[in-house]
Amino acid sequence: MGSQKQRKKKEPSSPIRWAAVVFCLAVVMSAGLSLTSEFLLSGAGLVLAVCVLLLFILLGILFDIIGVAVTAADPRPLNSMAAHKERGAKEALRLVKNANRVSSVCNDVVGDICGIVSGVTGAVIVARICQTFGAPSIPVSVGVTALISGLTIGGKALSKTFAIRRGTDVMHWVGRFLYIFRRRGKH
């Protein structure tokens, strides 16, 4: 009987449970990023609002890179690195073994939230431009929206090739980053 328990593979959790986890994660992360955005933008000038916007666009692109890289990474070199106890290899391997979930969180949850918060930040920028320069709102709104879309989509398109070609390296870098926090958590 004991050997049957050892041989029995861990059953994947149900899709409904995973959807509930993703929903909760999205709500918490969205609230956190929205509060951060509101805090940074309250009373902010145009330059700071543009900097916050660029930060959210870059964050979305970064997580898109991770989401693509985790699906493209080759686990064999990470296994070897983990066997040689290289920093971050174990963490990277764990992410690659759960690529579907990691990709979902990075691309769907974080990426979509960054897109939404970028849109809200864009609205603040439109209001600041119209208020400061007395510009008509419709052309400014269309221009800012188009620019945000272009930067986000263009940045993600440019980064996908990199993420696919260097997926294993990207995941090792992410693993090293996570390793730092794991080490700090033990002290």
Image (cartoon, rainbow, N blue to C red):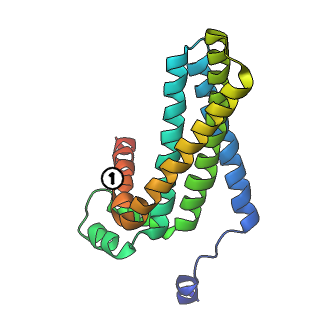
Q: Position of residue 19 (x, y in %)?
A: 72, 59
**Residue 46, horizontal then vertical, whole percent:** 55, 17
Q: Toward which corner of the image does residue 124 lie, by quadrant?
A: top right
* Residue denoted by label 1: 176
Q: Residue 116 versus residue 103: which sits nearer the camera?
A: 116
Q: Nearer the viewer, residue 152 or 141?
A: 141
Q: Going 49% across and 62% down the picture, which residue do you hit?
A: 68
Quadrant of the frame with the C terminus: top left
Rendering quarter of residue 165? bottom left
Residue drawn at (58%, 38%) of the image: 148
Among the 4 quarters of the image, the one containing residue 16: bottom right
Percent across and percent down for residue 133 are 62, 11
In the rendered image, the vertical position of residue 106 relative to residue 186, given as above or below: below
Quadrant assignment for the N terminus: bottom right
Q: Looking at this rendering, what residue extends furthest in the right direction?
A: 16
Nearer-the-camera pick, 110 or 13: 110
Q: Please tell me whether residue 140 is drawn above or below residue 164 in the rendered image.
A: above
Numbered disc total = 1
Q: Residue at x 61, y 35 (%)?
A: 118
- SS type, badge 1: helix
Of the pair 173 and 143, the residue shown nearer to us: 143
Q: Residue at x 52, y 66 (%)?
A: 99
Q: Is residue 169 left or right of residue 61?
A: left
Work out which residue is located at the far left of the displayed protein and give it. Answer: 84
* Residue 2 horizontal side relative to residue 27, left or right: left
Q: Amino acid at mark 1?
A: Arg
Badge 1: residue crowd in 10 Å (few <14, some 14–19, many ≥20): some
